[in-house]
Image (cartoon, helix red, strand yellow):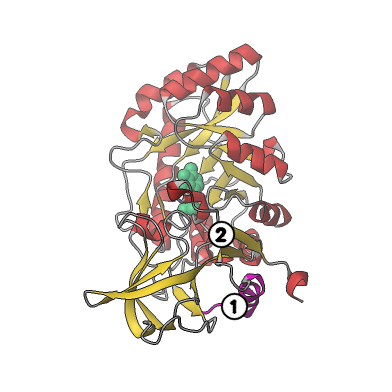
Amino acid sequence: MFIPTHIETLIRQHKSAGKTFNAYVYDTAPLQEKVALLQAIMPQGLEVFYAMKANPHPAFLQAALAAKVTGIEIASLGEANKAVNAGFSPSQLIYTGPGKSIEELEWSVTHRVRTIHIESLVEAHRLNAVCAIQGKTMEVLLRINANFDIHDAQTTFSGGSKKFGIDEEKLNEALPQILALPHLHFRGLHVYAASGVLDVDDLLHNCKLVFDLTKSIEANYAGVNCDIIDFGGGFGVDYLEAGINFDPKAYADGLAQMIADYGFAGRHFVLELGRWLAADCGYFCTEIIDIKTSRGKKQVVCAGGINHFRRPAALAINHPAQIVAMHVGKLFAEQETIHQEKVYFGGPLCTSADKLANDIYIEDAQVGDIAVFGLAGAYGLSMSNVGFLSHAMPQEIVYTPKATA
Ligand SMILES: Cc1ncc(COP(=O)(O)O)c(C=O)c1O
């Protein structure tokens, strides 16, 4: 991994002598560039939403707003409030995710979010009841747990037994009930296959499946149109630095061809992207507190662990890592350092689950240096165990071009 100069400059600027450094450093420029790229290459009718669960920091929301994403995919009332505070209108919010509470449904109906993506029959009936009380109708998509999964994806959201959506096999039972609910206006389908997918063909296969489902629903139910088709998120990033990058142009071209083949022009197509937009906007930068050899392996203990950066342990992968040398003097002559070896990185927590990376090659490092983990802009702090051991939160430092000019 290569740490951009402006990121290293920010680390050095914010590292004060005698104070432990533990921070996320963000530069949201890649998010804006990627949204602009998608807007330029995607087929007519495709709308890009930012899945803010990847990183709900205001700088990311503001970057998404400035890039003119169609809106924000939210999955909680907390996310709704953050999106609105950042300048999005409720009509730009699409509400997904299982387990929406009554308060969340009430807020969504009161404030008129754009669509609510129904995850179960219970949710459909609950939403209908909320709408009835308020005398309103809500636009809904039906989330389907398709009978299809992408085996080598980092996380799958469809196929097998899932808490997401309604099983494809139960569609004939569920759809008539949903269509009969007087306060719900059915607008289409949401089928999100998997997250972290690098192979374009896998995601296009999911699109084809959704198109087939759309055709069969429209053939079986007179007057029903799926005029919004939501493919969820899923574009992957190259955590393993294997040189495999998701190819958005191939995806765009494949989707455009499919839309033409199915005669689906004129519909709305939705992408809710988190990881691909946010990952390379962030670096988790944590000071090396201790280095010791334990039974033949170097153990590196950092200021922050899974309390601040849980993703590598949760997904059992190493993020790319590099060291910013701080040249702190040794405390004693025999103090251990790292030189061209594979080591274990952990945090300060009293659990062996507290792993930042394992068997990761480091050129040189010593106590006091800053370990920098890349591709940490997505699912970094937002999916970490921040309460465990009550350590202070890491700083979140945002690069603004004039701040370091
Ligand atoms: C409903 C929904 N949409 C979008 C996303 C974003 O997915 P990704 O980060 O893979 O783009 C997620 C991630 O979990 C999700 O659950």
- In this rendering, the answer to whether 314 lies above or below 139 is below
Query: Nearest the camera: 116 or 106?
Result: 106
Dot 1: within a 10 Å radius of its alpha carbon, few (fewer than 14), some, or many (20 or more) residues?
few
Residue carrying label 2:
278
Image coordinates of residue 62 in percent, x first then y, are: 70, 53
Residue kind at label 1, given as amino acid type: Pro
Closest to the observer: 371 or 201?
371
Q: Left of 301 or right of it: where is 55?
A: right
Determine the residue located farthest toward the front in the rendered image. Answer: 332
Looking at numbered disc 2 in the image, what kind of residue is underneath it? Ala
How many angstroms separate mark 2 from mark 1 (CA)? 16 Å
The residue depicted at 39 percent of the width and 23 percent of the height is 174
Disc assigned to residue 250: none
User: What residue is shown at x 57% (from left), y 62% (from top)?
Assistant: 24
Q: Secondary structure at mark 2?
A: helix
In this rendering, does residue 305 appear at all?
yes
Q: Is residue 232 visible?
A: no
The residue stretch that appears in magenta: 1-14
Location of residue 351 in the rendering, given as x and y in whole percent from the top left corner: 32, 54
Q: Nearer the viewer, mark 2 or mark 1?
A: 1
Q: What percent of the width, then of the height, locates residue 257?
A: 50, 57
- Residues 216 and 328: in front is 328
Q: Is residue 170 left or right of residue 122?
A: left
Task: Confirm or reject: label 2 Cβ below 8 Å from ligand 1.
Answer: yes
Does the CB distance between marks 2 and 1 fall below 8 Å? no
Q: Secondary structure at mark 1?
A: loop
Is 228 placed above or below 366 here? above
Indicate the position of residue 266 as horizontal and vertical percent values: 61, 44
Residue, x 52% and y 82% (percent of image)? 328
Name the residue at the left extreme: 295
| Closer to the camera in the image, 140 or 101 | 101
The residue where tag 1 is placed is 4
